[in-house]
Amino acid sequence: MRSSDATRLRKTTLKDDPPCPPVITTAATEANGGGLGYPACMKSDLSRYRWPKTHPHCVEECASIHVTQILPYLDEGTFTHGSAWIFPELPTTIRLVAQHSGVCRRWYFACVGCGRRCENLYRPDKAAPLNWRCRLCHDLIYASQRFGFRHPLRRKLTERKRRTRQKRAARFERSLERDRVRRRASDNLASPVSMSDDEAAVLAAQARATIEHARSAAELAAKERRERLESLTATFVRRMRDAATVASNKRERDRCTRHADAAEARLAKLRQPGADSAK
């Protein structure tokens, strides 16, 4: 593009653009050194406007029904072998479906709005009396997603929190029981064992027999290691003597002779009575 075309395009763009609205500055912005104001086409109370909440209610504010509260109404046959169940008094609101989890059968609510399985159904304060639906259908969030940890709704126990506390307490009880079992076992080991003289003599004889067997096995293994080491050393001495005999120069002959003499000294120490094979 030529420079004249670029200049003409820029002038056309600036001429076609609408004029910007005048900027209004308040006393607060002037006190802060001018700053940025807002256009006059906007309302003056825009800075005080609060955006509406995306989620109108929290889970802790609504009435809830957990699936464990409905299971006692099921008869034994339906609870064990059934695949679906409808509450007789509320046929269009509460419906249970079974889900196989290995050898177990877990029951869930089937939400009327979306049809998904869930463990809880909720009803906000201003909703219809039979409008029991899941958390997603009512567009609910948890109090922890909106309020700080000091808010009273954060201390309200939901069914999931209650079950979590029960499981934590059960784990703590099991750990205490394991500690008590270990303590009793350590006390039993620390306490002296009472036995008669005959039983003590039998145990002493068994201990002596075990010690003698271990000692004889160790002596036999040491003897085998000594014999094998003597055989290897004798073979090495013989090969060094042969290499010194056929060596082509004096340096090689002296080196082979020196190694043979050292090996013979080692072999003589091994053949001495009472010599340790580990040395």
Image (spheres, grey):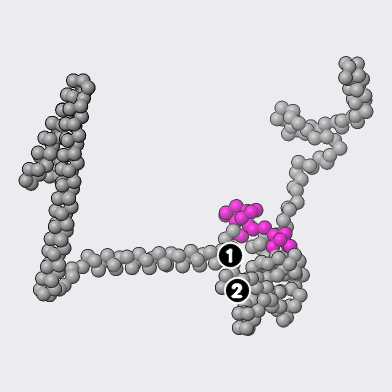
> Could you say which quadrant of the image residue 18 lies in?
top right
Q: Nearer the viewer, residue 84 or 126?
A: 84
Q: Is residue 272 visible?
A: yes
Q: Which residue is mark 1?
A: 160
> What percent of the width, then of the height, locates residue 43?
83, 41
Q: Secondary structure at mark 2?
A: strand
Q: Quadrant of the N terminus?
A: top right
* Residue 139 colored in magenta in the image: yes
As drawn, is 114 to the left or to the right of 59?
right
Q: Of the numbered discs in the image, which one, if any, rests on residue 105?
A: 2
Q: Nearer the viewer, residue 118 or 98?
A: 98
As drawn, is 137 to the left or to the right of 70?
right
> Could you say which quadrant of the image residue 128 lies in?
bottom right
Q: Secondary structure at mark 1?
A: helix
**Residue sitting at 60 percent across and 79 percent down?**
80
- Give the residue type that dot 1 points to: Arg
* Residue 38 colored in magenta in the image: no
Secondary structure that dominates the magenta span:
loop
**Residue sitting at 69 percent across and 62 percent down?**
135
Labels 1 and 2 touching (C-beta < 8 A): no
Which stretch is magenta? 135-153
